[in-house]
Amino acid sequence: RAVTKSRARRGERRAMASVINGERVSGDEIRSQNVMAAISISNVVKTSLGPVGLDKMLVDDVGDVTITNDGATILKLLDVEHPAAKVLVELADLQDAEVGDGTTSVVIIAAELLRRAEQLVRNKIHPTSIISGYRHACKEAVKFIQERMTIGTDELGTDAIVNVAKTSMSSKIIGPEMDYFARIVVDAMTAVKRTNSAGKTKYPVGSVNVLKAHGGMAKESRFIDGYALNPTVSSQMMVKRIDGVKIACLDFNLMKSKMKMGVQVLVSDPEKLEAIRKRESDITKERIQKILDAGANVVLTTQGIDDMCLKYFVEAGAMAIRRVDKSDMRAIARATGATLCMTLANMEGEETFESSMLGHAEAIYTDRICDDEVLVLQKPKAKSSASIILRGAND
């Protein structure tokens, strides 16, 4: 019985090998190929490193041209197929997401470590010993940095932090204007500074909203103390500024209520038809009135608002903004302390809107930038936020 089982297992292995139908490569040959692939990726971005680095012009299949010297952007636009090279591309992406700078440096350092490791392997040192050495060196390097080279931002002062921002920008396209942009970035991050219950200070980058407005010079970019978003008021009859904001964040539409698909109503009396149409409009009117009665003077929704219903907001002296992006809506809800409302229905099946769902801010107003208008939410009560509006000829 044991012999029969072992034969069955061998048969399964052969069947699996025939299904995969691949070629296995191992040993020195594939190791050298992996190192060569990593070095090739490094050579692509090596010349773009530093303040005197060269820009790369990349053309995709559609014909769109990208000119940049950012390592993560260059590698993202390359069509990389080799598995080892893809690891370096993911490394640059991770560095860009976590730190925002040093994408080219990490690729060059990783490729150089692999090149040195290959030399050690040729000197008959086992790869496991090399990996252990690298890990030990990494721990010692981190320990040295934490003990000898780490300085708190409170001790540095604003000027030193501005110089750090300048260093990061010196190799970018905005390098000639780095003094101006460094000050904007430092102001934005200082505005979103938070201290948690444990006494630790954090600077959440996600709390800074970056908007782009085509046209003008780069030096026309500016910092706004508040959350700015592209959608503006839905009607020109609405007020342009409100102080003492009570904001309602909705994730449903305020369009004229319609019956669901597949529902039919047979009407024998023509007079009843008009009553049905009136009731459809009244349902939306009642929802708006419940929101306004709760004290809301600014209503944001991710979906649409019926044009006929805008007059209720105008009469109440409130702002209504429709088709707000969901990421903006979540950020505003966090900053103001509002509850993102998916529906007005409660546990009993009735439609209600509580004043506790409202968020609060000092003011909201519309601001004109070039040909467009932006809506600025100033000094939200729950969490601080900031915005940077970038100007320029193109993206």
Image (cartoon, grey):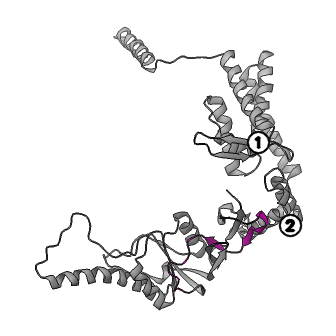
Q: Nearer the viewer, mark 2 or mark 1?
A: 1
- Where does the magenta region start and end? 217-238
Left or right: residue 386 compared with residue 359? right
Q: What residue type is disc 1 on? A: Thr
From the top left corner, tell me how far across and down residue 197 is, in percent: 68, 69
Left or right: residue 112 compared with residue 65? right
Which residue is depicted at the point 66% across and 31% down?
A: 85
Left or right: residue 353 compared with residue 134? left
What residue does disc 1 label? 104
Say which element carries label 1.
helix
Q: Nearer the viewer, residue 211 or 145?
A: 211
State yes or no: residue 224 in magenta: yes
Say which element carries label 2.
helix
Q: Mark 2 vs mark 1: which is more N-terminal? A: 1
Quadrant (top left/top right/bottom left/bottom right) for the C terminus? bottom right
Which residue is depicted at the point 80% across and 37% down?
A: 46
- Quadrant location of residue 368? bottom right
What residue does disc 2 label? 158
Q: Nearer the viewer, residue 113 or 170?
A: 170
Q: How far apart are marks 2 and 1 (CA)?
A: 27 Å
- Quadrant location of residue 38? top right
Would you call the spot at circle 1 few (<14 residues within 10 Å), some (14-19), or many (20 or more)?
many
- Quadrant location of residue 196? bottom right
Q: What residue type is disc 2 on? A: Thr
Would you call the spot at circle 2 few (<14 residues within 10 Å), some (14-19), or many (20 or more)?
some
From the top left corner, tell me how far across and down residue 11 is, in percent: 39, 12
Q: Nearer the viewer, residue 299 or 341?
A: 299
From the top left corner, tell me how far across and down residue 35 is, in percent: 72, 25
